[in-house]
Image (cartoon, grey):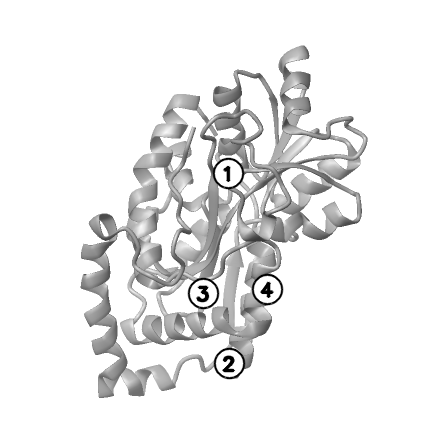
Amino acid sequence: MAVFDVGAQPGRCASPARRGVLCMALAPALAGLLHSPLVAAQAQSWPSKPVRIVVPFSTGGTADTLARIIAAQLTKQLGQSFVVDNKPGAGATIGTAEVARAPADGYTLLVHTTTFTISQHVYPNLTYDGQKDFVPVGLLMTTPLILVTGPNSGMKTVADYVSAAKAKPGQVSFSSSGAGSTPHLGFEMLKQAAGIELLHVPYKGGGEAITAVIAGNTHSYFAAPIEVTELIKSGKLVALGSTSVKRTPGLSAMPTLAESGIANFELIHYTALLARAGTPPDILAKLSENLMRALQAPEVRDKIAQNGDVPAGTMAEAGDLFTRAYPVWGAVVKTANIKP
């Protein structure tokens, strides 16, 4: 089972048939914004006070890790503090709703993951509309995930994992960072593709979900490389396989689930920076420009890329990605009958 690949050509408007219209529409607008005298004057005044970056997950997960890396670089570039504020809970909808209520002035931002385009399908009574209340600033990262287990699970390969699940239906468990999160849907896809039954144990964020696997409270988790690379190296976690169809450069030594017998299985995860809809366009332009600069800074690029992740992704690419993602994840949620 495959989910679209969002990271094929970082930094470019890939797939002309699907991205061309949006890319062509946004590019002139952004160019005009950046060269308008009025916009330039307004942009100079922002930020004049600390900027809060809300992460709707607990500390230690992908979004939190990336938010802190980017916050430090933006602070360095813009000379004003960018502060990470974790607001986990309810499948990442609590922190997201808080940002949706904040003024659209560029001083409250949101770092979110693939879960952003999933939640609307899982939680039908949200107080916000992801497609109307937010605008993307850019993609921080795209990456395959890694299926990990604890060192005492006895499982060393994907085949071991599937065999254990088939031997004891519903007893092999997986952590998630909340109902409807990317790891949750990843395992729902795996269940369908491998014909197995698993037990879902949701947590408030990736950090807690990973800790549960290390402690042996759950058997498995789909983690971003940046979350678990060092834990795998130290032996606290065992990597079974990655979720790209073909091996990626950063994870070249790791087999994929597809080549391990789960035919065509693919799950590409992304993390993005968003702002409130209605944020002044000059501020969005300045923020987007500085985000792209931050992602190209060697200290940022190396931290992300060395973990097997791919940094970069413009405002146009992020917007196109979200537009395509909503119906795709809606179909997955419906097929798996996922409820809050």
Which secondary structure lies at badge 1?
loop
Res. 87 mark = none
**Residue nearest the observer in this picture, 159 or 144:** 159
Is disc 2 in contact with disc 3, using a CB cutoff of under 8 Å?
no
Disc 3 crowd rating (10 Å Cα; few below 14, some 14-19, many 20+) is many
Q: Residue at x 20, y 70 (%)?
A: 29
Disc 2 crowd rating (10 Å Cα; few below 14, some 14-19, many 20+) is few
Q: Residue at x 42, y 46 (%)?
A: 116
Which secondary structure lies at badge 2?
helix
Res. 77 mark = 2
Q: Residue at x 68, y 23 (%)?
A: 160
Q: Which residue is labeled 4 in the image?
A: 68
Disc 1 crowd rating (10 Å Cα; few below 14, some 14-19, many 20+) is many
Q: Residue at x 70, y 29 (%)?
A: 219
**Residue 231 picture location, percent across and down:** 74, 48
Q: Earlier in the sequence, mark 2 or mark 3?
A: 2
What is the C-alpha distance between the residues marked 3 and 4? 15 Å
What is the C-alpha distance between the residues marked 4 and 2? 14 Å
